[in-house]
């Protein structure tokens, strides 16, 4: 049952000319249970109803009070505070969670709609660093969240596998590299060559020209260039896939920039026909000064295409292939101008779906204050970071729970989860400073804390059931909500109740941190309940009621963790 909807509808039926939807937006969850389970400030209604807020609240109170399930209503200084019947609330929430199980919180609102999510998209021949983690995890969370709400999602890894950097790499490889070293060193060796190119080119600027001509050769299908390029791609992909496996992330397609090499002709012709391309010293560009943006270069003097060009071609291809309702691009905020420029170009080409292209920017990641930059070679490799985290968790487990089964698996789930959760726990647009202390703190507002709380719930269920299985045969009509009226239990129930709303707003705002924060709130409420109320009590009805609540929390934590890409081990 949706109490908020019901409340809004009921109040709307008392008031003339006020829509339930508008009321729904006004209804709040008071921070303090003394102020009700729901509260509605009446100030904004004052003008439309030509009455003082207090009088409006008084009037609604007199009509609403006693209408099930709204047991008690108070009118306090222009606020309407509504108290729901605790027993029916408990039954209702438990029934919803336990009957939906791993679908609790889901919906079918997205049915028939397609969302393309372009995320992760690392660059070939450069290491996958902490900066790419954000795109991967935010994108993956948006994928899970949309899927849970019924959308058909297409996860695209728009690999950076094309562009002048390949010309540079070929030049550096021919000058400084050799086959064995690349085979042995993998991406690190490719990175070394790339960095070396930049150092050398500072002294010998003609190297830049050489690199450009190698890229042009590549675009024209030159055999030697193509072979080297393929080799670089294979080496890089092998390493990227190790990371994706560690993170448990998958894509529906890896169609990257090179995929569009033969698909740019038509859009370029189209831009020409529509009078958008202007010649400038042999190059072709789209002027955007009317929109307060610098021009977007589409074709260089030497005929080479650019990042922009490929993005325009890719968007048209995706629209034709998937007929998306929205296409999301998850990248660092530094690329905002790039996206604004070419989104505008799509619009100027006359495509009304330009409005469905959405850039989802995020802030920078720094480690101990140092900014991450691939060019300088000053990178912290993600694999190293993840492995270190897994090692630390393994140490903690060895110390606290040395006999635990599948230690290695759990160390991976929690170690990786710590990093991911840390990344998703603040608003995405904020810069993140990575700290080991914070990420791995089992008591702080962290991934390990939420995962540990989930494992604790599993352990309670296991102990009481006397079996290692956590499946609780809770027959709903055996639960007596009488025993869940205390403040701690009610707080947990309230958290359980808002799960769906939180997922919804995470989707609307494209903000996975709403789910992360929710999980911390739920875990904290549960831990307070756990400390206040003994679960293994003699009285079977009390025990069953509390167990059902534990089970509901376990289900909800697990569903929520999954939405942000974390696993939920049953024992830690
Ligand atoms: N490869 C780019 C980078 O690492 C991100 C690509 C994002 N997607 C896109 N369609 N432009 O910065």
Image (cartoon, rainbow, N blue to C red):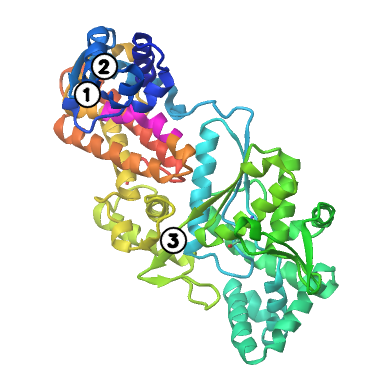
Q: Is residue 360 left or right of residue 59?
A: right
Whether tag 1 and tag 3 are in contact, CB under 8 A, the answer is no
Q: Locate ligand 1 by image quadrant.
A: bottom right
Say above or below: 216 vs 67: below
Q: Is mark 3 within 8 Å of ligand 1?
A: no
Task: Give percent across and percent down for residue 74.
Answer: 18, 17
On-image quarter of the N terminus: top left
Task: Give percent across and percent down for residue 510.
Answer: 48, 43
> Label for residue 100?
none
Residue 493 belongs to the span the image colors magenta: yes
Could you give the CA–CA distance between mark 1 and mark 2, rounded to whole angstroms?
Answer: 8 Å
Stretch in magenta: 492-504
Q: Residue at x 63, y 70 (%)?
A: 125
Say above or below: 76 vs 260: above
Q: Which residue does the numbered mark 1 point to in the structure image?
A: 78
Q: Which residue does the numbered mark 3 point to in the structure image?
A: 386
Q: Which residue does the numbered mark 2 point to in the structure image?
A: 56
Q: Earlier in the sequence, mark 1 or mark 3?
A: 1
Task: Give percent across and percent down for residue 411.
Answer: 38, 54
Q: Secondary structure at mark 3?
A: helix
Q: Earlier in the sequence, mark 1 or mark 2?
A: 2
Could you give the CA–CA distance between mark 2 and mark 3, rounded to whole angstroms?
Answer: 57 Å
């Amino acid at each position: 049952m949706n109490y908020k909807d019901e409340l809004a509808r009921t109040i709307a039926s008392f008031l003339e000319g006020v829509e339930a939807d508008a009321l729904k937006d006004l209804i709040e969850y008071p921070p303090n249970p003394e102020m009700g389970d729901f509260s509605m400030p009446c100030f904004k209604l004052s003008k439309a109803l030509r009455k003082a807020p207090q009088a409006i609240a008084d009037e609604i109170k007199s009509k609403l009070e006693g209408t099930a399930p709204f047991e008690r209503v108070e009118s306090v200084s222009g606020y309407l505070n509504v108290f729901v019947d605790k027993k029916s609330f408990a039954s209702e929430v438990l029934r919803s969670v336990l009957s939906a199980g791993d679908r609790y919180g889901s919906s079918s609102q997205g049915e028939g709609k397609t969302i393309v999510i372009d995320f992760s998209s690392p660059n070939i021949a450069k290491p996958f660093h902490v900066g790419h983690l954000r795109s991967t995890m935010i994108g993956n969370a948006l994928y899970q969240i949309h899927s849970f709400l019924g959308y058909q999602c297409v996860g695209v890894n728009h690999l950076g596998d094309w562009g002048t950097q390949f010309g540079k790499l070929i030049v550096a490889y021919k000058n400084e590299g050799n086959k064995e070293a690349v085979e042995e060193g993998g991406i690190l060796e490719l990175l070394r060559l790339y960095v070396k190119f930049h150092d050398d080119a500072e002294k010998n600027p003609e190297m830049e020209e050489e690199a450009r001509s190698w890229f042009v050769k590549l675009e024209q299908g030159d055999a030697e260039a193509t072979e080297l390029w393929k080799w670089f791609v294979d080496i890089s992909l092998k390493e990227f896939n190790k990371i994706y496996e560690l993170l448990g992330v998958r894509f529906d397609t890896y169609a990257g920039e090179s995929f569009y090499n033969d698909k740019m002709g038509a859009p370029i012709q189209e831009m020409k026909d529509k009078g958008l391309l202007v010649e400038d010293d042999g190059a072709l560009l789209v002027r955007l000064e009317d929109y307060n943006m610098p021009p977007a270069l589409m074709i260089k003097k030497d005929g080479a295409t650019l990042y922009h060009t490929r993005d325009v071609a890719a968007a048209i291809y995706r629209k034709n292939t998937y007929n998306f309702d929205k296409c999301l691009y998850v990248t660092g905020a530094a690329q905002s101008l790039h996206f604004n420029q070419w989104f505008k170009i799509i619009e100027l080409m006359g495509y009304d779906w330009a409005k469905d292209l959405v850039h989802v920017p995020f802030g920078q990641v720094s480690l101990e204050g140092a900014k991450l930059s691939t060019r300088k070679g000053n990178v912290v490799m993600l694999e190293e970071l993840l492995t270190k985290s897994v090692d630390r968790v393994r140490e903690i487990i060895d110390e606290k729970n040395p006999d635990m089964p599948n230690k290695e698996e759990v160390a991976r789930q929690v170690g990786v989860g710590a990093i991911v959760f840390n990344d998703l726990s603040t608003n995405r647009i904020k810069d993140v400073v990575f700290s080991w202390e914070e990420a791995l703190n089992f008591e702080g507002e962290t991934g390990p804390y939420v995962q540990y709380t989930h494992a604790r719930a599993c352990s309670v269920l296991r102990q009481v059931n006397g079996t290692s299985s956590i499946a609780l045969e809770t027959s709903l009509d055996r639960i007596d909500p009488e025993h869940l009226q205390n403040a701690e239990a009610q707080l947990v129930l309230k958290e359980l109740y808002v799960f769906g709303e939180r997922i919804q707003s995470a989707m609307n705002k494209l903000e996975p941190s709403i789910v992360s924060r929710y999980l911390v709130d739920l875990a904290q409420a549960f831990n307070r309940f756990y400390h206040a109320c003994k679960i293994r009590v003699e009285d079977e009805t009390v025990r069953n009621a509390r167990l059902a609540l534990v089970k509901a929390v376990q289900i909800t934590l697990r569903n929520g963790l999954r939405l942000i890409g974390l696993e939920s081990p049953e024992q830690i």
